[in-house]
Image (cartoon, helix red, strand yellow):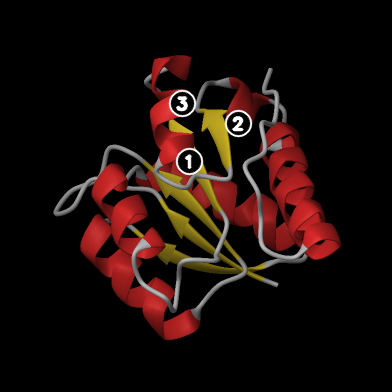
């Protein structure tokens, strides 16, 4: 399974990529919104982890573009944000499958929480076909 990891923070991107690789996933990385869209269309990953605060095109713009493109519309997107849960409903309305609040816990627990969210979303996708909205509790 291939995951597109879109994160502009090199530190968080490398840490998350290592955890995903260790868990057996293939990982493609992008550090800005424009390259994220290009890579999503080229590779058509099984899942996208999408930061909201990105250069060139912000995460919300990327999410909207993904969901309006027939080639990428069915790829589940887990939104990674430090902005808190006030945006959760808006992001789900835009097509996010799950919402994950970035914090120090993301790295402190060796990304176990992030992996649980990824596995939950991928498991739901396999069990039910195209993803419906899911809410995955975070720490």
Q: Which residue is mark 2?
A: 107
> In the rendered image, which quarter is residue 112 located in?
top right
Residue drawn at x 60%, y 30% is: 106
> In the rendered image, which quarter is residue 18 located in?
bottom right
**Residue 23 visible within the image:** no
Say left or right for 51 vs 118. left
Front of the two marks 3 and 2: 3
Q: Residues within 10 Å of mark 3 (few under 14, many from 20)?
A: few
- In the depicted view, which residue is nearer to us: 104 or 60? 60
Residue 79's mark?
1
Q: In x, y percent, where is residue 68?
A: 34, 64
Q: Is residue 93 above or below residue 44?
A: above
Q: Which of pointers 1 and 2 lies earlier in the amino acid sequence?
A: 1
Q: In x, y percent, where is residue 126?
A: 80, 64
Q: Residues within 10 Å of mark 1 (few under 14, many from 20)?
A: many
| SS type, badge 3 | helix
Q: Which of pointers 3 and 1 lies earlier in the amino acid sequence?
A: 1
Residue 89's mark?
3
> In the rendered image, which quarter is residue 105 located in?
top right
- Rounded to the nearest angstrom, the CA distance separating label 3 from label 1 is 12 Å
């Amino acid at each position: 399974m291939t995951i597109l990891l879109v994160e502009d923070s090199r530190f968080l991107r490398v840490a998350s990529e290592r955890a995903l690789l260790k868990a057996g996933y293939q990982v493609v990385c992008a550090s800005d919104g424009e390259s994220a869209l290009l890579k999503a269309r080229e590779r058509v990953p099984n899942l996208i982890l999408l930061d909201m605060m990105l250069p060139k095109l912000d995460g919300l713009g990327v999410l909207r573009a993904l969901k309006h493109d027939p080639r990428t519309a069915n790829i589940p997107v887990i939104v990674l944000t430090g902005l808190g849960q006030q945006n959760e409903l808006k992001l789900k309305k835009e097509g996010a499958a799950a919402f994950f609040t970035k914090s120090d816990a993301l790295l402190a627990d060796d990304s176990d929480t992030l992996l649980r969210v990824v596995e939950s979303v991928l498991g739901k996708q396999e069990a039910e076909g195209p993803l419906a909205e899911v809410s995955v509790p975070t720490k």
